[in-house]
Structures are given as structure tokens and as C-alpha cells.
Amino acid sequence: MFSFFKKEKWAHLKTTTFTGITWAVGHPHEKKDGVIYIHFYESDKGNRKIDTACSFSEVSQEKIDEYVKSSGAYQQRIIRWLNGRYDPEIPRYSQIGEEDTANALRGKVE
């Protein structure tokens, strides 16, 4: 009956990386190579979100988000997925649940 009061359950679907990223950190002429990680999540209610992280502790979260949102991959694929489009490379919440259940029954999940 009161299903709208149920707490939303989130599942981590996939992690994608941007490699070969060069950031100016520390001194103005010091540049380091790093990796940006994009984590895809979907809820049991169909809501979607991403979280971003970087291999540099010196780079702010705002800069990481700004870089990701200005990338071609975000503009061409990720934004469409966030708005509900199907992407064959990103599993759905229902698929993750089925895989987790099957693995648990096989004894592969600790």
C-alpha cells in the first residue's frame, strides 16, 4: 500500500576511467598524469546518477566534475544515459540484482 514511503535502493552498475589526464598541481609548471573515475548508479525506482573521483588529492571535486561534464564522452553518451536512454555498455538495476543473486547462490559473493 504505502510503496512511495519505501527507501530507494541504489546499485553500482559500472566504473569507467578517463586515462592520460594531465593536471597542473602544486607549482605552476608542475604537471602530473592521472586518472578520473566515473561511477554509474541506478536505483530500483529508475533514477540514475554518477559520481566522479580523481587519482589526485590536490584537485578539487568541482574541477573534476567540470572536466567530466565538458568531455565528449559525457556530452555524447553519459548525459543521454542520465536522462533515461538505454546504453548497451551500462547494465540496468534489474540486471545487477539478478547477477548478484545468481553469484550469491553459486557462493561467489562473500
Image (cartoon, helix red, strand yellow):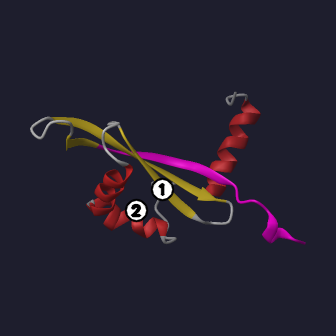
Q: Measuring 9% from the left and 38% from the top, which residue is drawn there?
A: 29
Question: Magenta stretch containing residue 6, yes or no?
Answer: yes
Residue 13 position within the rendered picture, expressed as x and y whole percent measured from the top left: 55, 50
Identify which amino acid the numbered label 2 is placed on. Answer: Ile
CA gap, disc 2 to disc 1? Answer: 9 Å
Viewer-side residue, 2 vs 76:
2
Q: Nearer the viewer, mark 2 or mark 1?
A: 1
Q: Report which residue position mark 1 lands on.
A: 50
Q: Are marks 2 and 1 in contact (CB under 8 Å)?
A: yes
Viewer-side residue, 28 vs 93:
28
Q: Measuring 64% from the left and 54% from the top, which residue is drawn there?
A: 10
Image quadrant where one finds the N terminus: bottom right
Relative placement, left or right, of 13 versus 65 is right
Image quadrant where one finds the C terminus: top right
Answer few, some or many: residues within 10 Å of disc 2's Cα (few below 14, many 20 plus, some between 14 and 19).
Answer: many
Q: Report which residue position mark 2 lands on.
A: 78
Q: Measuring 63% from the left and 49% from the top, which residue is drawn there?
A: 96
Relative placement, left or right, of 108 versus 35 is right
Answer few, some or many: residues within 10 Å of disc 1's Cα (few below 14, many 20 plus, some between 14 and 19).
Answer: some
> Would residue 92 be visible to someone looking at this image?
no
Q: Measuring 42% from the left and 69% from the top, which residue is drawn there?
A: 80
> Would residue 19 be visible to someone looking at this image?
yes
Residue 59 position within the rendered picture, expressed as x and y whole percent measured from the top left: 31, 43
Residue 20 position within the rendered picture, expressed as x and y whole percent measured from the top left: 22, 40
The stretch of residues the image draws in magenta is 1-18
Determine the image quadrant of residue 41. Answer: bottom right
Relative placement, left or right, of 78 versus 96 is left
Q: Earlier in the sequence, mark 2 or mark 1?
A: 1
Residue at the right extreme of this rendering = 1
